[in-house]
Amino acid sequence: MTLERRQFLTASLALGAATAAPGLLAGNTTPSRYPDATWQVIDKQFEKYMLFNTPLERQWTGGLWLEGPAWNAVGRYAVFSDIPRALQMRWDEATGEVSVLRRHVGHSNGHTFDDRGRLIACEHSPARVVRYEWDGSLSVLADQYNGKPLNAPNDVVALKSGGVIFTDPGYGAHVDYEGKRRTLELETAVYYWQDGLKEPRVLTTELYKPNGIALGPDGSQLYITDTAPSHHPDQPATITRFNLQDGGQSLSEPERLVESSQTGYDGLTCDVEGNLWVGTSGGEGTDGVSVFSVDGTLIGRVLLPEICANVCFTGENRNRLLMTASQSIYTLYTATQGA
């Protein structure tokens, strides 16, 4: 059976519209009642960060385990990882399109842009921290300590001084899925690196599985999640705040803000008021993003239908939360801004 002329024209027009405006198909197509049920208020102070008339938008799906979002304000795009497929992905805010930025990237995980706009990535296999230079070349910043290979760098922040701090818990070395299975030769640690160093410097080894990392609003404090229960069932998941000393080359006064034996905390980011927005796992009703006040009080959640591994603020006003959640990426406008 063939289509009649009118049916054919209607189908062609619909296909043409979809092709011309792919971004329109990227977000939600199912309407939601305002306020969106994604918001969960636990403490009334969370209400000031909510927007009544904004929906949770699923921008894209099709990943295996998505991680490591980083926002490029000049290009209006975010980089994120599909770790098992060893892909760097790119979400374009202006069009809503998602595309492959780079393939075969060593199962890269966390990303950041440094003070000069260069992309820095933590790779699992080979285990290293790399930087993409302006001419497109690749520089290896760190791949060993004391002559031994790093475990599997996980997440990274860039300092105004030009240095970087990264976590090295070793998840990419545990199974042949997010890297290459091998025995860890180093303690799990948090490291500092800057141009001119032959190898990174250990900042702390006190965390069992140092994972997500974020700077506070003024850059003087550092937040690190510890996903200890994955390999140390007798230890809780925690979020610890450190003071940065010596331009980020040392840490002091560790303060455990959050701990839980029921919930997992992964990647995190900080808003301008010092609240923490943390990728969370724990089952239905918990999966998504947990929001903690400066003193570590849980004030609210952004509930998702998937585990959320990491988050960052995006957009011209840095008020749009981008969440890498298992197989999908989601966005949600908020009434705050990223630090």
Image (cartoon, rainbow, N blue to C red):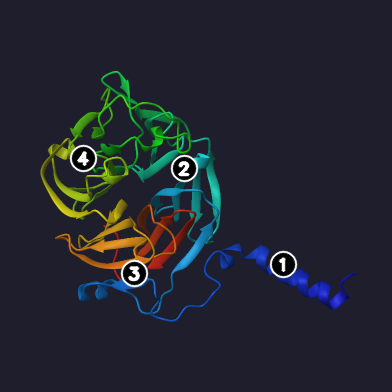
Q: Which of the labelled discs sits on residue 207, or is there none? A: 4
Label 2 is placed on what type of residue? Ile
In front of the other: 188 or 331: 188
Residue beneath disc 2: 83
Q: Contact (CB < 8 A) between labels 3 and 1?
A: no
Q: Which one is earlier in the sequence, the residue at label 1 or at label 2?
A: 1
In the rendered image, the vertical position of residue 121 relative to residue 67, given as above or below: above
In 3D space, how far apart are the residues under numbered discs 3 and 1 (Cα atoms)?
33 Å
Q: Which residue is mark 1?
A: 15
Nearest to viewer (mark 2 / mark 4):
4
Residue depicted at x 49% and y 64% = 58
- Crowding around mark 1 (Cα neighbors within 10 Å: few <14, some 14 to 19, many 20+) is few
Q: Residues within 10 Å of mark 3 (few under 14, many from 20)?
A: some
| For residue 330, above or below residue 267 | below
Q: Secondary structure at mark 1?
A: helix
- Residue at 29%, 18% (x, y): give it: 147
Residue 223 location (% of width, % of height): 21, 49
Disc 2 is placed on an element classified as helix
- The residue labelled by disc 3 is 334
Please name the amino acid that badge 4 sits on: Leu
User: What is the total number of numbered labels drawn onto the structure image?
Assistant: 4
What is the distance, in whole Å, between disc 3 and disc 2 at their CAs? 28 Å
How far apart are labels 1 and 2 at the CA level?
Answer: 33 Å
Which amino acid is tagged 3?
Thr
Marked residue nearer the N-terminal end (3 or 1): 1
Q: Is residue 321 left or right of residue 255?
A: right
* Residue at far bottom of view: 33
Quadrant in which the N terminus is drawn: bottom right
Circle nearer the N terminus (2, 4): 2
